[in-house]
Each structure stands twice: as structure tokens, then as C-alpha cells.
């Protein structure tokens, strides 16, 4: 990763990089690493992956939480980056859509009641896939990227690394250093930064420990008899509500703004009561318990004025925001100024336009295509989309698939996508189910980053959908490398049908789990 390698990108137009750093060891990072190495036929001199946790797998690696603390010498212990997955999570994607090309997913073993791999099985698959690269020494674990900074004149990227692996031999202290890379691929995932709604009173109840985001949900233990309200009706919120129902005080309230999308199967459960959107949270005065402890509760006021009193905890299944805050780029107006955070260019006002900005085809940073992102979008089948996207990136960096050679040309994709979202926002939105008086804000799924289920363009919703996007990348790849046609996943009518049928299958799996109290 030496400085000497960066000279290869000395001209303002970006050519083939010699050294490439992949950030993040989840599914997207792992398949990107494989494709950059294997599908380039080793044409890049150095390709490495760094992962801040002590193992690969991303969302699918559930480590044992330990308490992070300050040790007696004052040194900081390694922080925890817990996975947002939780015990009892049943996958919602079939193995065929989790299988990276040329690396089949093993047949699902024992759970005949449902075909979705468990968190552990998916982790095992990813670990097996990564093994070869870990042994080769191109995966560095316990290595956190603190900052990625663009070097002027397209001379690559400075990467500030914090090596947590040395802590044991270094008085609990990590080691910091700077590396230089010709090109960087950010695969840091989508589920790191929770989306906290801007609801009145939420900050206060959160500070008092009465509000929790789904990211930290770890099962219903500890919620026995508690009065709870869950916000949202997508996968996390539905799972959390049904995990709480047998344990917590009933009804478990679930606050929803509109009917659920068909790809969020949810069981009816008489113990779960759907209510409308929340207007505000009010902290109630603390009361002394029989044990002599002071206990705080809250009142949750709904948009229609209904008050739910004495609530112990609100759990927000309100989704996540993309957040690679460590990426700093040269200002577009004046490249001589010091760098600015890439995320400072996003639209903070309209959440629907919140995005990793200026990406050509959700991959290449338009102003300097030696920076790329894989996994910056929300897909129905994230594993195989990342496989195709990173194959495309590999061939783009080798000069085998074309992409626009001007900044303006590369920005066209981003502009068109913003226009698509703005157009979608003009469409009348379905009313909230339980609160007819409220005017629901646009769904968080009408958003820049959500590719949606869309098919191959046979209807309006297909535009900008996952199949159209992935097939576009696939077509480019196959034009350059016809041999990959037989290898890459497809988004044809049969595959789309199979993907759509996953949701009723998931519904059946949830029913089985409910009946068997899993
Ligand atoms: C609760 C939950 C359930 C899900 N269920 C499914 C499902 O059933 N099926 C499905 O297909 N998808 C599911 N998903 C989507 C899931 O995110 C994708 O399957 C997949 O994990 C995305 O891979 P990724 O590599 O982009 O991100 P991640 O899996 O999030 O991996 C990102 C990695 O980057 C690392 N990283 C981040 N920042 C840094 C840094 N600064 N330095 C070094 N490393 C860094 C992280 O530690 C992490 O290991 C689920 C997501 C969640 C949150
Ligand atoms: N394998 C599984 O079964 C499983 C389980 C959990 C999670 N996941 C995956 O994990 C990812 C994240 O899922 P997620 O469920 O955490 O988040 P999500 O898919 O982004 O859903 C967020 C939910 O919160 C609602 N919401 C957002 N802001 C709100 C607000 N201010 N007030 C009320 N409701 C609000 C949304 O409804 P609106 O439409 O009204 O905005 C939506 O119902 C997804 O990829 C999901 O598929 C999978």
C-alpha cells in the first residue's frame, strides 16, 4: 500500500488503478474483493479489504457483545459495532438470491418449515467465501477506517486507519497510521446509522433511556410485562412486535403510517394493536416503585389526539440512513481548498433525496471515479446486486466497459434519479390505515436509495427498479466478457416471479414460527 503506487493516477483523467482498498467485510465488500482479484485476472497489483470488526460477515456476523469501557491506564478499549440482526431473525431472501456467482449457497439443512437461511447459515456461507482471501492475507480484520481523503490532481486517496488488532500488546491502545491508495471502494453497508424521526419529545425520552432503535434490539428478554409501542410496519418493526407479543404487556402497540408493502409480510396477532402515527412523546413525572426506585414512563400522543399513557419503552423500527461520514472529497468549486465531507452535499431537508451523492449508476463518484461505492442502494436481493455491480466496477476500472468520460456525463445518472424520485413524490399517497385525519408524509420507501421491486420496465414502477438497474450493468458486462453470461445471476421473468413468491413463503414461515413459539 506504499506511496510509490499512487503515481499511476497522476493524470487528471483516471486510468487503471494499481492499488485498491475495499472498506467493509460484509457481503458487498467480500464479493467486491473477489471480483477485483479474480475477474481482473490479477491485473491490479494490490487489492486489500479492511474490516473494523474481528470477523467478516457484516450484518450476518453476530458477535458476543462486550462492554466497552476505559481501562485503568486510561486507554480506550475497542468499541463495539453490533450487527443490527437479532436472535430469531428469519431471512427473507432465498438461497438462490444470496449465492454469489461461482460460489453456490449450500442446500438449506434442517428447517423444513421454511427455506430461508438463518443468520448463522448465512454467516457460515460468507465466512467460507472469505476464507481463501483471509488465508492469502488480503483481509485485515480489526482495522477501522477513520477517514478517506481525496488527494488533489487525481493522485489517489489518503486513508487514515485505526488498527485495533494491536491493542493487547499496546496497553489497550490502537495504532493509527495513514496509507495511500490509488482507488477506494466503500462497502460500509447501509445499516449503521439509525434513522431517528424528528418527532416532538423523542430526544428527551431517548436521553432518559425510554426509546430504543431496532439496531439495538436483541430479543424480548427484559421486556416482561412492559408497556411498549413499536414505530413502523416493515420487517424490523413487525418482527419486534411479534417477538414482544408473548412477553410484554398486551396489547403491544404498533404505530403505522400506511398499509404495509407486500414485501413486508406481517401476521395478524390479536395481542398487537395497530395505531396511527405519533405526534409527540411526553415524559411523565417519575414515580417511586414498591422497591423504592424512581421509574420514568411516557405518554405517547397520536396524531388524532389519542393518548397512550404509562408507556415504558418506544422501539423505533424506522430504518436507517447511508452514512459514510469518513469520506472527504475536494470541493467541486475549488479543488485547491481543503477537503469537505462528501455527505455534506446531500439534501438534509427532504429525506427522500438523502443519498450518497453524485454516483454514476450508484457506483462511481462522478467527480473522481477512483472512488466507488458498492451497496449504497437498498435492493431486494443485495448479495447478487453487489456481485454484478462489483463485476461492472472491475471491468470499468480495467477499461473494458465504458462509462462517461466527463464529470457532467457521469452526473447525468444522479440527476435523472433525483427527477424520478421527485416524480414519484407527486403521486397521491395511500392514506394511513388507522388515522384517516392525518396527512401521512411520503413513505420512506419513495427514496433515492431504494431500488424497489420493479420488473424489467413493463410498468411505471419498473423504471429505476432493481431488475432494470441490475440488467443494465449485466448487459454491459456481458458485452465485454461474453463468458460471464453463463455465470452471472439473472433478473429475467422467472427470477422476478421466484423473488416475488418469496414474500408469501416468508409469511408461511412466520406463521410456523408463531405456532411453535420460535
Ligand atoms: C436486521 C436486518 C435483516 C436483514 N435481513 C436480510 C435478509 O434476510 N436477506 C437479505 O438478503 N438481506 C437482508 N438484510 C440486508 C443486509 O444488509 C444485506 O443482506 C447485506 O448485509 C448488505 O451487505 P453490505 O456488505 O452492503 O453491508 P453490511 O453487511 O452492513 O457490512 C458492512 C461492513 O462494513 C464494515 N464497516 C463499516 N464502516 C467501516 C469502517 N469505517 N471501517 C472498516 N469497516 C467498516 C462493517 O463493520 C460491516 O462489517 C438485512 C438487514 C438488516 C439490518
Ligand atoms: N430478514 C428479515 O426478515 C428482516 C428483518 C428485519 C430487517 N430486515 C431488513 O433490514 C433492512 C431494514 O429494515 P427495517 O424494517 O429496519 O427498516 P425499513 O425497511 O427502512 O422500514 C422502516 C419502517 O419505518 C417506517 N417509518 C419510517 N419513518 C417513520 C416515522 N417517522 N414514523 C413512523 N414510521 C416511520 C416506514 O414506514 P413508511 O413507509 O411510512 O415510511 C417503515 O415501515 C431492510 O433491508 C429489511 O428488509 C430483514
Image: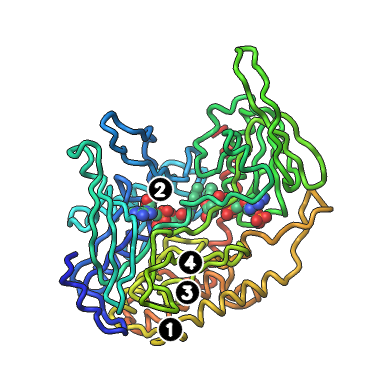
Q: CA distance from mark 3 to mark 4?
A: 7 Å
Q: CA distance from mark 2 to mark 4?
A: 23 Å
Which circle's residue, 2 or 1, is located before the other in the chain? 2
Q: Residues within 10 Å of mark 3 (few under 14, many from 20)?
A: many
Residue drawn 49% across the image and 36% down it: 218
Q: CA distance from mark 1 to mark 3?
A: 10 Å
Q: CA distance from mark 2 to mark 3?
A: 29 Å
Mark 2 = which residue? 60
Drawn side of residue 333 relative to residue 463, left or right:
left
Front-lying residue, 16 or 162: 162
Question: Which residue is outermost to the front?
Answer: 337
Q: Is residue 336 left or right of residue 141?
A: right
Spot occupied by residue 210 in the image (x, y as percentages of width and height): 60, 34
Q: Position of residue 260 (x, y in %)?
A: 68, 54
| Residue 358: mark in rendering | 3
Q: Is residue 291 above or below residue 57?
A: above
Circle 3 SS class? loop
> Image point 39% across, 49% down: which residue?
122
Which residue is denoted by mark 4 in the rendering?
A: 356
Indicate whether 483 appears above or below 50.
Answer: below
Judge from the rendering whether residue 165 lies leftward or rightward of residue 403; answer left or right.
Answer: left
Q: Earlier in the sequence, mark 2 or mark 4?
A: 2
Report the coloring of the rendering: rainbow
Q: Residue at 20% of width from left, 43% of height from top?
A: 166
Decide if residue 96 is in sight here: no
Q: Which numbered disc, 2 or 4, marks the residue closer to the eye? A: 4
Give the mark nearer the N terminus: 1 vs 4. 4
* SS under mark 4: loop
Disc 2 residue crowd, few under 14, some 14–19, many 20+, Cα 10 Å: many
- 1 or 3: tag closer to the N-terminus: 3
Amino acid at each position: 500500500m506504499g506511496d510509490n503506487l499512487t503515481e499511476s493516477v497522476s493524470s487528471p483523467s483516471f486510468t487503471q488503478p494499481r492499488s485498491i482498498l475495499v472498506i467493509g467485510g460484509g457481503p458487498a465488500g467480500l464479493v467486491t474483493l473477489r471480483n477485483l482479484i479474480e475477474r481482473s485476472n490479477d491485473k491490479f497489483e494490490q487489492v486489500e479489504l479492511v474490516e473494523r470488526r474481528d470477523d467478516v460477515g457484516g450484518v450476518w456476523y453476530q458477535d458476543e457483545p462486550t462492554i466497552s469501557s476505559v481501562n485503568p491506564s486510561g486507554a480506550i478499549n475497542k468499541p463495539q459495532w453490533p450487527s443490527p440482526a437479532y436472535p430469531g431473525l428469519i431471512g427473507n431472501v432465498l438461497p438462490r438470491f444470496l449465492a454469489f456467482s461461482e460460489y453456490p449457497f449450500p442446500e438449506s439443512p434442517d428447517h423444513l418449515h421454511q427455506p430461508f437461511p438463518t443468520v448463522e447459515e448465512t454467516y457460515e456461507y460468507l465466512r467460507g467465501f472469505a476464507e481463501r482471501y483471509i488465508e492469502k492475507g488480503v483481509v485485515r480484520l480489526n482495522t477501522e477506517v477513520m477517514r478517506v481523503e481525496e488527494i488533489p490532481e487525481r493522485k489517489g486517496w489518503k486513508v487514515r486507519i485505526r488498527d485495533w488488532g494491536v491493542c493487547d500488546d499496546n496497553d489497550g491502545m490502537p495504532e493509527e497510521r495513514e496509507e495511500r491508495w490509488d482507488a477506494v471502494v466503500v462497502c460500509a453497508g447501509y445499516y449503521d446509522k439509525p434513522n431517528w424521526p424528528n418527532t416532538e419529545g423523542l430526544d428527551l425520552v431517548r436521553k432518559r433511556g425510554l426509546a430504543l432503535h431496532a439496531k439495538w434490539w436483541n430479543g424480548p428478554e427484559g421486556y416482561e410485562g412492559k408497556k411498549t409501542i413499536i414505530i413502523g410496519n416493515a420487517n424490523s418493526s413487525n418482527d419486534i412486535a411479534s417477538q414482544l407479543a408473548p412477553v410484554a404487556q398486551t396489547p403491544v402497540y404498533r404505530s403505522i403510517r400506511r398499509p404495509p408493502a407486500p414485501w413486508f409480510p406481517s401476521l395478524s396477532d390479536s395481542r398487537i394493536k395497530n395505531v396511527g402515527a405519533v405526534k409527540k412523546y411526553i415524559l411523565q413525572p417519575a414515580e417511586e416503585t414498591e422497591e423504592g426506585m424512581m421509574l420514568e414512563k411516557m405518554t405517547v400522543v397520536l396524531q388524532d389526539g389519542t393518548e397512550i399513557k404509562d408507556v415504558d419503552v418506544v422501539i423505533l423500527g424506522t430504518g436507517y440512513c447511508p452514512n459514510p461520514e469518513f469520506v472527504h472529497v475536494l470541493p467541486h468549486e475549488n479543488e485547491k481548498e481543503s477537503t469537505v465531507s462528501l455527505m455534506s452535499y446531500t439534501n438534509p431537508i427532504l429525506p427522500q433525496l438523502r443519498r450518497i451523492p453524485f454516483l454514476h449508476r450508484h457506483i462511481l463518484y462522478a467527480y473522481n471515479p477512483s472512488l466507488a461505492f458498492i451497496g449504497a442502494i437498498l435492493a431486494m436481493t443485495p448479495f447478487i446486486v453487489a456481485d454484478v455491480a462489483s463485476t461492472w466496477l472491475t471491468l470499468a476500472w480495467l477499461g473494458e466497459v465504458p462509462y462517461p468520460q466527463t464529470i457532467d456525463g457521469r452526473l447525468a445518472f444522479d440527476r435523472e434519479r433525483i427527477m424520478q424520485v421527485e416524480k414519484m413524490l407527486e403521486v397521491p399517497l395511500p392514506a394511513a390505515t388507522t388515522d384517516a385525519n392525518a396527512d401521512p408524509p411520503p413513505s420512506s420507501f419513495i427514496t433515492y436509495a431504494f431500488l424497489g421491486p420493479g420488473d424489467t420496465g413493463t410498468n411505471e414502477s419498473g423504471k429505476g427498479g432493481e431488475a432494470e438497474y441490475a440488467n443494465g450493468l449485466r448487459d454491459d458486462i456481458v458485452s465485454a466478457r461474453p463468458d460471464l453470461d453463463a455465470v452471472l445471476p439473472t433478473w429475467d421473468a422467472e427470477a422476478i416471479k421466484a423473488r416475488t413468491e418469496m414474500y408469501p413463503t416468508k409469511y408461511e414461515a412466520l406463521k410456523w414460527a408463531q405456532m411453535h413459539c420460535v
